[in-house]
Image (tube, rainbow, N blue to C red):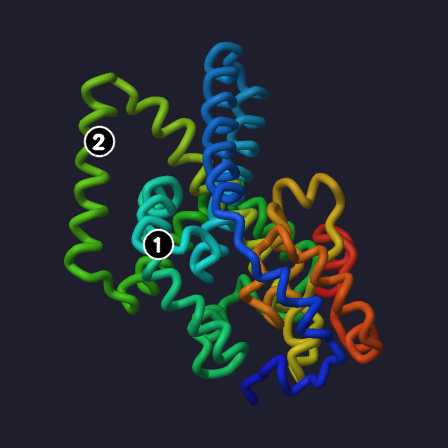
Amino acid sequence: MPSFDARDLNLNISKEELKPLYEVQPLRVLASLLGEWIFIITVIVLCNYWFNPLSYVLAVVLIGSRMHALAVIMHDVSHFRFFKDRRLSDFITDLLVCWPMMINVDSYRKNHLGHHQHLNTDDDPDWMAKLGRSEFKHPQSKSEFIGRLFLYLIGFQGIMDLKWMIGRVNQNKKSPSQKRQILIFYILLFSILTIFGMWKFYLLYWVIPFFTSFLMFQYIRSFAEHFGDLEYTHLLNSTRSVYPSFIESIVVAPYNISYHLEHHLYPGVPYYNLPKLRKILMKDQSYREKAHYSKGYFSGLLREL
């Protein structure tokens, strides 16, 4: 399969229109990171105060969706869309997103930029890692897909994913300093949890949402981005963008991650400018005719399975 490049499409797009879209707003990104954590803490406090099975299930779904939102912001940071000081940018992102999820942004960046450079080819680490896995096979029935979501909700698929992810992480080995940073983070975290007797909260409101709703939302989005009814003959039909419903835009596609085709064309455009980028691209007739769009994750995507 050939490698794709946006320059090969000959889109009639003005550089003058594109240039302002690359401007980065680091304080906006920082505010979003802190806002997601404030929301997560608020959900934990409210659920603990009015604890019952229904409120807990709702909390797991909400917290998992915000974990997913944090991961989406981290994805933007991997494209250097945060502070100009890369060390500061990566440290904040590691502290607020990656270390709590047992990864680090630099390792993710190496993998993800390889995905962009070699989209859907044998040199694409994401494509090769998922190719042949039953979760990403095409075609598959709606019942198979929905059944997979159920396996995530009960935690089984999340545990299977962890085993798979450990294998992938081992391929992108961390430097000694990165390993020390993660080790120090968890020594401090586990010490705090032990001293203040907060292990129950950590397991209920972080570990369980991580293995259930968070990984489920990640899977839905990951499947939508590069699998299903795609032709893979050029860049415009080798990934899809999705028009999400209001609820889907919150839990499955926060921070404009549904604009995935636009992102692959111009990965330097930060998430908050992707709607403007789409408007510019839609002016081009070739783009309008060839770009792959789906309407909804639980409607359009299901029809394309």
Q: Which image quarter: residue 177? A: bottom left
What quarter of the picture does the N terminus occupy? bottom right
Q: Residues within 10 Å of mark 1 (few under 14, many from 20)?
A: few
Q: Which mark is residue 85?
A: 1
The residue that appears at 53% across and 65% down in the rendered structure is: 134
Mark 1 residue element: loop
Q: What is the x, y in percent for residue 50? A: 53, 11
Q: Is residue 115 above or below residue 26?
A: below
Amino acid type at circle 2 is: Phe
Q: What is the x, y in percent for residue 291? A: 75, 73
Task: Give the residue pinned by disc 2.
Answer: 190
Amino acid type at circle 1 is: Asp
User: Would you say 121 lies left or right of 13 here?
Assistant: left
Please tell me which residue lies in front, 233 or 24: 24
Q: What is the x, y in percent for residue 153? A: 53, 40
Q: Is residue 297 above or below residue 230?
A: above
Visible in this render: residue 25?
A: yes
Give the mark nearer the N terminus: 1 vs 2. 1
CB contact under 8 Å: marks 1 and 2: no
Mark 2 residue element: helix
What quarter of the picture does the C terminus occupy? bottom right
Please tell me which residue lies in front, 206 or 281: 281
The residue that appears at 24% across and 32% down in the rendered structure is: 189
Q: Which image quarter: residue 95? A: top left
Residue, far front = 16
Q: Is residue 251 above or below residue 20?
A: above
